[in-house]
Image (cartoon, coloured by chain):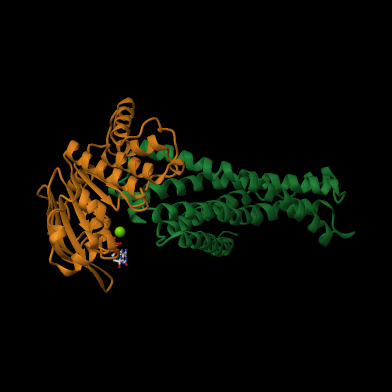
Chain colours: A green, B orange
Amino acid sequence: MISLLERREKFRTYVSLTINECIKIGYDSLFIVSIVSIFMGAVTTIQTAFNLVGPLIPDYVISLVVRDMTLLELSPTIIAIVFAGKVGSNIAGELGTMRITEQIDALEVMGVNSSSYLVLPKIIASLLMFPILVIISATLAISGGYMAGVLTDVITGQEYIYGLRYEFNPFNIPFALVKSYVFAFIVASISSFQGYYTSGGALEVGKSSTNAVTNSCIFILIADYILAQVLL
Amino acid sequence: MIEIKNISKSFKDKQVLFDISGTFEKGRTNLIIGASGTGKSVLLKCLVGLLEPDVGSVLFDNRNFTNANKNLTTQIRREIGMLFQGSALFDSKNVEENIKFPLDILTNTPENEKIEKVNHCLELVGLEKINDKMPSELSGGMKKRVGIARAIVNDSKYLFCDEPNSGLDPLTAIKIDDLILELTQKLNTTTIVVTHDMNSVVEIGEYIMFLHEGKKLWEGNNKKILKTKVKELNDFVFSNKLMKKIK
Ligand SMILES: Nc1ncnc2c1ncn2[C@@H]1O[C@H](COP(=O)(O)OP(=O)(O)O)[C@@H](O)[C@H]1O
Ligand SMILES: [Mg+2]
């Protein structure tokens, strides 16, 4: 970790590397994140409607529940797990391959600090892009819920929107963002570590990728629990 | 000139290199030979600073690299070019970007001069007009050539090659050997080649160091090696039937 900050290359190199990583990490994850989010919102709406609504409970509670669940839990956490599966395994696979094919040694021989050159842009790009993905995800999930609710007639559009606004706690948004930063850091750093310290052959690269995803998921859930305890 | 003095290296409780010394002269191809697993790559990695020897030192033209300060380390690193066993080209960069990379990282050369240098090096290694190809589109021999071009682009004084002809057919292998010899003479580099290929030994062995189980058992050149009395070296040199017959 300390070696990340020593002997850094030219600043400009880092900016362009980080932009490349942002495209790879952020833009390329957009599709899977959108699909997951829309369905997540839709399913939450229908499930909530099915389980909750009786004559005593008003319909707008459905969208209220969807809103809070999405912001507080589903969007940051589920998308973090999707992110670990997509981006984490990619990072570990890429760094692992670079390690076993001596590309990392080649960088070191040229006098490049390979850990900061390769890892830092990935961590920064994840910290920049993941919160944006979470915001997009929350928006799409809530819209997905609206569509599902209106299409299946469990709630009217007006009531859905009324519920979204009802007793909204603005603190939920910074809470979701804090979670996103923590999860992004967990995924990027654990996956980089797993990949960077691969040794052996193609089989070990596969193992590193798997470990990156498993370990990221475990740490995401632990961090999720701790953050909920500390911040709520 | 590169000198190594009393280098020993262990991994955990397993000693790989035992007290190795030697001198590699400038402008000639110096070979480190030996069977697989004797520690050739480990020795080479100690030489270029990827591994730290437990005991001993490496001197680049009388500058001690082993416990050099930061400035000297950087300075010597700039003068080192290395060809790796699997070429180690960066998969995400095309040929031109790969060769240009050391210049990007180590120098402030203007972009058009860099491109000129890249093209000059490509010419030197006998490849032209493949600037836009990705490493995955190249054959093994072409990858090695691009790897060599990348190793010499920054006017390297020291050229290291780890098994430059592993995985190549005999004809391409000899071409790569000849290229290394030619570049060494043309650019007057101190070249160290790790190999277990007897063809290279005979072709380009101007100085040969023989390692066996981590110990230096013999040194000499390609003329002396065929008459050697050292049993382990004899077994290594005359390992195939054809060579035995010639003997
Ligand atoms: N990083 C390492 N950790 C532990 N052992 C190693 C390491 N690198 C090499 N070795 C051991 O050192 C010995 C020599 O390896 P190497 O130098 O790669 O042989 P070769 O002569 O074929 O290039 C082998 O037995 C190998 O297992
Ligand atoms: Mg080797």
In the image, residue B220 lies at what x, y percent? 12, 56
> Left of A47 or right of it: where is A225?
left
Asked whether B189 or A127 is in front, the reply is B189
Q: Residue at x 48, y 57 (%)?
A: A191
- Can you see residue A76? yes
Residue B194 image position (x, y, % from top left): 25, 54
Q: Position of residue A81 (x, y in %)?
A: 59, 57
Q: Could you say where residue B164 lies in the image, as x and y percent from the top left?
A: 30, 50
Point out the residue furthest to the top here.
Answer: B112
Residue most extreme to the front: B245
Q: In the orientation shown, which residue stands out farthest toward the left?
A: B62
Q: Quadrant of ligand 1?
A: bottom left
- For residue B29, above or below residue B119: below
In the rendered image, which quarter contains the C terminus of chain B?
A: bottom left
Q: Quadrant of residue A228?
A: bottom right
Q: Nearer the viewer, residue B214 or A20?
A: B214
Residue drawn at 84 percent across, 46 percent down: A150
Total marks in image:
0
Viewer-proximal residue, A39 or B116? B116
Residue A110 makes an appearance in the image: no
Q: Give left or right: position of A65 versus B184.
A: right
The residue sitting at the right extreme is A55
